[in-house]
Image (tube, helix red, strand yellow):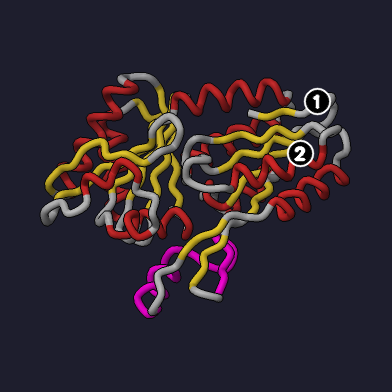
Amino acid sequence: MDSNGGDDMGKVRIVTDSTSDIPVEVRRRLGIEMIPLRVLFGEEAFLDAVTIEPEQLFAKIQSSSTFPTTSQPSPVEFEEVYERLLSESPHSPIISIHLASVLSGTYQSARIASSAFEERDITVVNSCSASYGIGMLVVKAAEMAEAGSSRDEILAEIDRLRKDTQVFFLVDTLEFLQKGGRIGKASALIGSILNIKPILSLDSDGTVFPTDKVRGSKKAIGRITELLKQSFGDDPVRVILAWTDSQPPAMELGERVKAELNVQEIGYTTVGSVIGLHAGPGTSAVFVNRV
């Protein structure tokens, strides 16, 4: 984490990027600022979670001759948001929480932008995560900011949650991770035989790696639940389920998790277009941490 000096005088402002996959109504309610990444089909650019959603993405891939790429926001885009927030609330610290630096240059763009405001209180956080693994940190930070918590209190809770959150992705195919060049350690699973379902997770720095591979979705859901039970036991937990373009497998995973874990809070969201592009259609995800 990088922090510039300042006084904790105003309510902390929270910034994130579109890969946190936080529903728009939650962002609005909590005053979370979101800077979108881009999905590029050749010369045609779309703003993640603004002008393209996962269902549109996968339909467009089917009809397009080029496989899309993604790009991070520029430092200038971050500077514009920081400038606006500082003009609105000159004494408010800013905490800016972003996609794992091993997966994208987004965090680096935010750091470069923050260096233009050396006298102001801007802290840029590498989430070391993706999708609602980031979202859980951001939402908690925004809830604490609304309740009047200080920058340091919020950063301490982010640090705790970052170490405590478990993330599992159940993907239908590794084709999209391979094409996007984001597969990391999961490359060993490419070419798995038919109906072997890879369960992917994230290392402590956000690197994608294969946790297990199981034949069939039902067994994969059982295995994910078993892994979560090993991590959390009977501790009270918060759970978010997410999916790219097909909701039923994620709901089935949610039912299984509710039956096995001490779930105190549960929520649902979609995996956005940038993360969805790398995970592929038919992906389900679960994000869990202690309450």
Crowding at dot 2, Cα within 10 Å, few <14 / some 14-19 / many 20+, comes out as some
Q: Secondary structure at mark 2?
A: helix
Front disc: 2 or 1: 2
Q: Position of residue 100 (x, y in %)?
A: 51, 40
Is residue 89 at all visible to an observer of this figure? yes
Taking depth in this image into account, of 145 and 179 the one nearest to the observer is: 179
Depicted 118 relative to depicted 267: above or below? above
Q: Secondary structure at mark 1?
A: loop
Q: Which residue is mark 1?
A: 5
- Look at label 2 and name its amino acid: Ser
**Quarter where residue 220 is shown:** top left
Q: Is residue 79 left or right of residue 40?
A: right
- Could you tell me which residue is drawn at 35 percent across and 26 percent down? 262
Taking depth in this image into account, of 45 and 131 the one nearest to the observer is: 45
As drawn, the label of residue 115 is 2
Q: Magenta segment, which residues? A: 44-64
- Could you tell me which residue is drawn at 73 percent across and 24 percent down? 150
